[in-house]
Each structure stands twice: as C-alpha cells, then as structure tokens.
Image (spheres, rainbow, N blue to C red):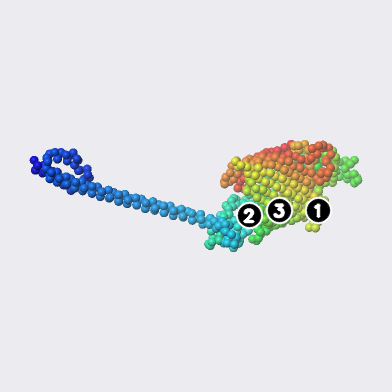
Amino acid sequence: MVALAALSALLLATRLACAQDDDPDRDPVAEAPSDAAHADADADAGADPDADADADADAEDAEADADTDADADADAEAEANAGADAEADADADAEADADAEADADAESDADAEAEAEAEADEEDDEPDSARLPYRIERIEVRGNSRTDTGVILAYVPFHAGEPLDLEDPRVEALRWRLLGSGWFEEVRLRVERGSERGQIVLVVQVAERNTFVIQSLALGLSEGLLNSDAVDSEAHPYFGISVAELNLFGLGLSLEATALLSFLQQGGRLRLGTTNLAGTEWGLSGSLFFNNGREFFGNDDVVIALDECMRDPMSPMMDLPCEAARNAVLEYRRYGGTIGTGVDIADSWRFTLEWHFEALELVDRPEAASHRRGTEIVPIDFHIHDGLSFVSALELGVALDERDNPGLPSEGRYVFVDADLGTQLIGSSYDFVRVRAGWREWFRLPEAHHALRLGLFVGAAVGDAPFFYRFYVADMSDLIPSRMLEMNLDRRAAPNLLGTAIQEMRAQELAGRADVEYSLWLYESRAEVRGVVLYGLVGLYTLLDRDDLVIAIPGYEGATRIPVDLTFDVGIRLDTVVGVFNFGFSNLLGFIQL
C-alpha cells in the first residue's frame, strides 16, 4: 500500500510538470492542486513519511515555479504599460510643441504691428534721459486706386525721419481732414514695425468713395411777379441743381457747376479749386458766375410812382397819380467771379481768404416806391446804385470741422466765422461790412443710434451793402423756398406763425436763428444708400434793422414788437453715394401761404 501511494504521488507530480511544459501560457497557479486534493492523496497514501515529504517538496517546487512565471508576466505587463505611457507623453509633447509653434506664428504677425506701440510704451516708462527716439522710417498710403498718392501725402503733416508721438493731436486731425475731403468712405491710421528698433512705418489706410455728388437740388413752385405793374402774382416752376466732382482725375481738384432755371430768374456758376497747391498746404480756387434775376421789395400794399408822378420833384409820391402794386420789382444782372486761397492753421481749423469781384447792372425798377410798415408809410430803399456799378470785396473765413461724417453727422461740431469787407480802396462802388457766424454741435445719444443737434447763427450787414448781401426770410425760415445763387425765388413774406412784427421784414441788416434737431437712424449700410434718417427740427429766428433796436415798429404792442417767428421741419434724410437728399414737410408748406 505504501508503495502504491508513493507511486501515485510520483505520477501526479510528473503529470503536473508535463502539463506546465506543454502549455507555458497557462497560469501555473490556476493549475496547482488544492489543499483538498493533497488531503485526499495523503489519506490514500497512508502513513509513509518519506513519500509524503517527497510529494510535498515536489508540490512546493511547482508552486515556486508558478510564482516566478507570474512575476515575470507582471514585470512584462508593467514594462508594456510604461512604454505606452512614454509614447503618450511623447505625443502630447509633440502636440504641445505644435500648438506653441502655431501660437508663436500668430503672435508674430500681431507683434510685428504692435511692437512699435509696445516700444513706445516702454519708452514712456523710461526716464527722459534714457528714452529712445521714435522716428518715422517712411509713410505708406494703401487702398487708393483712383486718388494719386502724392495728393494724399500732401495732407500728411509728418515726414520721414521726424519723431512721432502717437498722442500728437495732428494724427487725429489728419484723419478728419481726409474724411472731410469727401474722397474717402473710411480713413485709418496705424504704425508698423520698421527695419530697426525705434523706427516705424506710418500707414494711411483709405477706402475710396464715389466723388461725383449732387450737392443741392431744388425743385418746386415759387410765387413771383413779372414786373411792378403786375397785379396778380403767379406761381412758376423752378429747378436748381449743384453738382460737383470732388476729385477730378484723381488729382484732388474739385469742379462744381450750379444752375438755376425758372421763368423769372436764371443763373449759373462754375467753380474749380484744390486744397493743396503744388504740394504746399495752401489751396487755390476760382469761380465765374452770371445771374439774371428779379427782386421783390415791399409788402402787399406797395405804392409805386408812374412817369407822370415825377412831374413834381418836390413830392413824387403825394397828390399825383400813382398806382398800387403787389411788390416793387427790381430787374438786374450780375456777372463776375472769385479767386481765393486757404490753409489749415491748427488741427481741424481752416483759414480762407477770397476776393469777390463783379459788375452789377440795374435793368429796371420803379422810379420811386413806398409801402406800409406797421402804421407808417415809408419809402423803399432798393440798395442798388443806378446804371452799372461794381462790387469788390474781400472775404475772410475761419472754420472748425470736427464732424464724424460730413453727410449724416452724429457727433462732433462745426463752427464758422466769415467777414466780408467791401471798399472803394479795392474798386468797389459799395462800402460795407458783413459778418456771419454759425455753430452746430451734434451729441450722440445712448441706446439706439440717434443724435441731438444744437444750432446757432448770427449775422450783420453794416453800411452800403447791396441787397443780395443782406439777410432774407428765405435764409432763416424752412417754410419758404431758400435762396439759390443769392437769388430770392419767392416774393412771400415770413409765415408769421407767432403774430409778431416779423411780417414787416424782407431783406434786413441783422439776423439770428437758434434751433434744435433730433435725428434717428432707420437704416445703415455700405451700399448705394448708406443711411436713412428720420429727423425733426424746431427753431426761432429774427430779422431786423439797426434802427429797430432803438425804435419799435409802430402799430405793435407788447411782445409782438419783437420780430421773431417759428420755423420747423420733419422728414426723411437720405445719405447716398451721390449726395444727401432731404424729403421734408417744409417742402410742401413752402408752397402754401401760412
């Protein structure tokens, strides 16, 4: 029995060893006999201690071999995992390097443009003694396909080799000047890195616009008289237009043509100019014009003298046969021209000087005329010399233009002062002084795109000023057709909505107006119609002579003695590629006697 048990144990050990050799991939630990199998073998083998010892030794050796193989497999798996981790880390590092390289490339482009500003900021932090000069290496103009580069550079107040302060107000003033030329839709100024540290390239980036524009358009009916003998006034159509090419042949020349056609009056003007003459900061302009016009004097109860009224020179208008008329009509012709210059004096300020010269021919007028002014009958002064006379005057002007958009401004200001001096010293038949001043301020309101504009105008004509140099109701009120080419299109007096002495005023020495306008942008685009604005304005204006400041017009009491009236308008304003057009309620009211 003992021998049988020993033989069974030996066969079992041999089988286990053979199984491990035949299948090395199988887990030796899983194939090892359990403690229960050993117990059964011991029970079957009996009490042979040597056989049990040998069997136990063989089993322990088998378990040891199994543990060794398991450790080897674990080490191999760990090495494989470590290799995978290393490969993943390598891939991550490669991706990080690629991202870093891409970021570096993207940043290099931005840094190339911003390095000049960064250098300037660094220099600002340094003491003055250690600050490096920030100089212009060159100036480049980009985006101009029609406008000559030299014409644009003539506006630039900087030159290569000069130091440049980015906070210099001339930088922003340059942008406003180029926008104000009417040649460009958009103007941007920026700096780029130069070839050396401390050197920069000043870039003027422009977006050109259409430069053929309609500056003004007048169309409608006006009330007038053919002559002083006409009893009934007639409504005649009129058409006026002013067109301009602001950048002729891309040379910065402006050519303007204005024409007025109607049954009673005709006129035309041609003007040519440049803002930069021969590369200098001075401009040059000239114009020629011709007017064949009529002017209407007096109120509806005018009395004119007939030829037989003049038989008594001591009393031409009294106790003699005379005739009532609607107006005393003056027929005249004007022809002449202007020549002038201008220069930018500081930032957005511009100074202009112009000489006006013309011949004034009186064609026909009543020998004498009077009209009722208040409760008095006073003679009419036609403010023109008989026959052929001459007007020679110098006009000095100063203007500040800081509007963000010349067509439809929403913020900024426009201020001007013009003074005309006519004197015999320069060949004038009339000695006079006329001064005009205006101020307009735009305020962009919060939330929606809308703006508020405040306006103020004052004017005075002192001395022997010709009638067309005086101030008219048509200049102040929006409710009757405006003058064109200094010709008064309509005979009607002020609407007199407030019932004051303004109804006695026609062409006066002094004028003033204050108004406020609200604008709401309904549409904005870069297409043919760039903007549509709904607007509404209201204002007060006055007209009077210097004598009216001392003695009130008789027949008026209280506040009605102050010659003031209300003006208003509401409508749509369009900004297009060919100009700005108004479609207002005042265009309709101008045809109605209020």
Q: Residue at x 10, y 44 (%)?
A: 7
Q: Amino acid at mark 1?
A: Asp
The amino acid beneath tag 2 is Pro
Mark 3 crowd level (few <14, some 14–19, many ≥20, 10 Å Cα) = some
> Of the numbered discs in the image, which one, if any, rests on residue 169?
2
* Point 60% across, 47% down: residue: 577
Q: CB atoms at circles 3 and 1 under 8 Å apart?
A: no
**Mark 2: which secondary structure?**
helix
Q: Is residue 333 visible?
A: no
Would you say residue 416 is visible in this rendering?
A: yes
- Quadrant location of the C terminus in the rendered image: top right
Q: The N terminus lies in which quarter of the figure? A: top left
46 relative to 512 in the view: left or right: left
Q: Earlier in the sequence, mark 1 or mark 2?
A: 2
Residue 398 badge: 3
Label 1: how many residues lie within 10 Å, few (<14), some (14-19) or many (20+)? some
Q: Residue 60: horizontal and vertical position, in percent?
A: 19, 46
Instruction: Residue 98: give x, y in percent of width and height.
Output: 42, 53
User: Where on the picture, by quarter, is residue 43?
Assistant: top left
Q: Nearer the viewer, residue 133 or 297?
A: 133
Seen in the picture, residue 435 relative to 375 is either above or below; the reply is below
Task: Tell which circle, 3 or 2, labels the residue nearer the N-terminal end.
Answer: 2
Q: Secondary structure at mark 3?
A: strand
For label 2, the crowd category at 10 Å Cα-Cα, with few meaning under 14, some 14 to 19 and many 20 or more, is: few
